[in-house]
């Protein structure tokens, strides 16, 4: 089996291989970077909303820092 002019070896069902430097590999890595950036921004937004919720309920907690260890 070939794709993009290079052979695809299927060692595990539903798992494919794309050599680094090919358009397919670059597209895949770009998509993974977009997903990682989205997850980071989503995490920060949720933390900001949680902080805002705590501050609205407990007014005395001004300036508290929430830290994630994930």
Image (spheres, grey):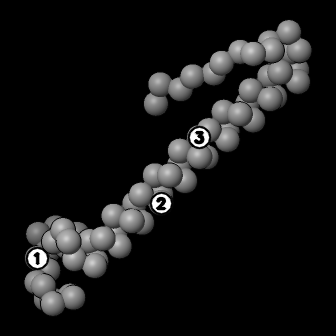
The residue carrying mark 1 is 9
Q: Compute the Cα span from label 2 to label 3.
A: 14 Å
User: In the structure shown, which secondary structural element does the residue marked by tag 1 occupy?
Assistant: loop
Mark drawn on residue 43: 3
User: In the structure shown, which secondary structural element does the residue marked by tag 3 occupy?
Assistant: helix
Q: Compute the Cα span from label 3 to label 1.
A: 36 Å
The residue carrying mark 2 is 34
Q: Residues within 10 Å of mark 2 (few under 14, many from 20)?
A: few
Of the two numbered discs 2 and 3 on the same chain, state the one appearing first in sequence: 2
Q: Give the foreground label among 2 and 3.
A: 2
Residue 39, visible in the rendered structure: yes
Q: Is residue 26 left or right of residue 55?
A: left
Q: Residues within 10 Å of mark 1 (few under 14, many from 20)?
A: few
Residue nearest the observer in this picture, 55 or 63: 63
Residue shown at 67% from the left, 39% from the top = 46
Q: Residues within 10 Å of mark 3 (few under 14, many from 20)?
A: few
Q: Compute the Cα span from label 1 to label 2.
A: 26 Å
Residue 58 % position (x, y):
86, 15
Vertical placement of residue 20 versus 69, above or below? below
Residue nearest the observer in this picture, 45 or 16: 45
Residue shown at 22% from the left, 77% from the top = 22
Residue shown at 88% from the left, 24% from the top = 56
């Amino acid at each position: 089996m070939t794709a993009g002019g290079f052979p695809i070896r299927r060692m595990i069902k539903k798992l494919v291989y794309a050599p680094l430097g090919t358009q397919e590999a670059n597209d895949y890595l770009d998509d993974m970077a977009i997903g990682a950036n989205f997850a980071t921004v989503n995490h920060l937004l949720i933390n900001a909303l949680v902080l805002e919720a705590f501050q609205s309920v407990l007014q005395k907690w001004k300036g508290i820092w929430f830290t994630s260890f994930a």
